[in-house]
Image (cartoon, rainbow, N blue to C red):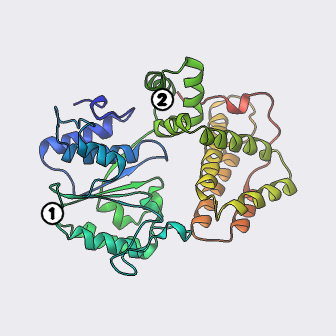
Amino acid sequence: MTTAAWNMHGQAEPVRALRHALDGGHLSHAYLLTGPAGVGKATLARRLAQTLVCESLEDGAPCLECRTCKQIEAGTYPDIEHIAIGGVCDEGGPAHKDHSADNSTRIRICQVRRLERVANLAPYAAPRRIFIIDTADDFQREAAHALLKTLEEPPSSVLLILLATDIDALLPTVRSRCQEIALHPMPYAELTAALRESFELDEITAARLARDAHGRYGLAHRMHTDPSLAMLRETALADCERLAAAGRNERFDYAGTVASRWSRERASVLETLDAWRYWWRDRLHEAANTPGPTRCTAAEAVRALQALTRVREHLMANTYPQLAMEAMMLDLPTLAAAHGEESRAPLMV
């Protein structure tokens, strides 16, 4: 069974690990898929689910064309529950309260209580119920503790698949009760080739997309199919470049602009911060691997990355957005202005 058979790009080892468990009949009751946003965690979770219930399984691979596979891809299969920030819960009775409009920043305990209830129901059609928990690193603390009960004593017909970007934000007890599988960005040349094949792109376009996605096939796919996302990240990188050399007043003005978007455009703010994190990560690689002077020291780049981690944590914890953004701006090092395109050079191998 090859990675290609699961229609996955660049994740041979994770696919191989899951395939080995399936072939040996020792699939775990809970998996923790880790890796940066856009690397393919949700796709791998769907492929595992499709393999378990596909109507036309061939050589251990889902067909991706049968009614069941298409329902899973669309998120409508009845025995697969998706748990995410802003999802439904059991508050208010059987109708379920929808948290998508109340500015939730964490998976709530009421959502976990719903998971516990549904987990004890018999599956409709599949041999087991599958719960895909997105952003498992963004649980309310009490919700994470509540999930432990299901992780410790899961019904035999339940499979839990947790997806996490920041594994350090998970409770150690949650992490220890899952089998962890790490997904990694693809090498630059490999992603470029995959994008050319998938979308029939020319070399220059594919290379630029691979660079801007930093090796993450899922993000590259989204940027190719959604030009507004590509523009958002391009603008974020330009802003990051400019503000790295800016003074406090300009930085605080920008902080206020971003903070004002938080309540209504959270996804775009998080995309902006993600783009910034990779910009500073590139500066860290430059400092560590370039002989002679660079725009910043490794210590300064690490300080910036820590500031970006903190601001995300503060925003997700409902800290006043402007204070969180201004604190980040104070922590970011001030660099000399760049010349030409040197700051955007791809650093992947």
Q: Badge 1 is on which residue?
A: 156
Q: Which class describes the residues within 10 Å of circle 2: few (<14), some (14-19), or many (20+)?
A: some
The kind of residue tagged 2 is Pro
Instruction: Please identify the quarter of the rendering in which residue 245 is found.
Output: top right
Disc nearer the start of the sequence (2/1): 1
Percent position (x, y) of residue 164? 43, 55
Q: Residue at x 34, y 45 (%)?
A: 73
Q: Which mark is residue 303?
A: none
Residue under the point 56% across and 39% down: 226
Q: Is residue 120 left or right of residue 147?
A: left
Structural distance between the alpha carbons of marks 2 and 1: 39 Å
Q: Pick the residue in front: 266 or 24.
A: 266
Element at label 2: loop
Find out whether the residues at labels 2 and 1 contact each other: C-beta distance under 8 Å: no
Above or below — where is 324 with respect to 197? below
Q: Quadrant of residue 28?
A: bottom left
Residue at (19% x, 45% y) in the render: 21
**Can you identify the residue that label 2 sits on?**
187
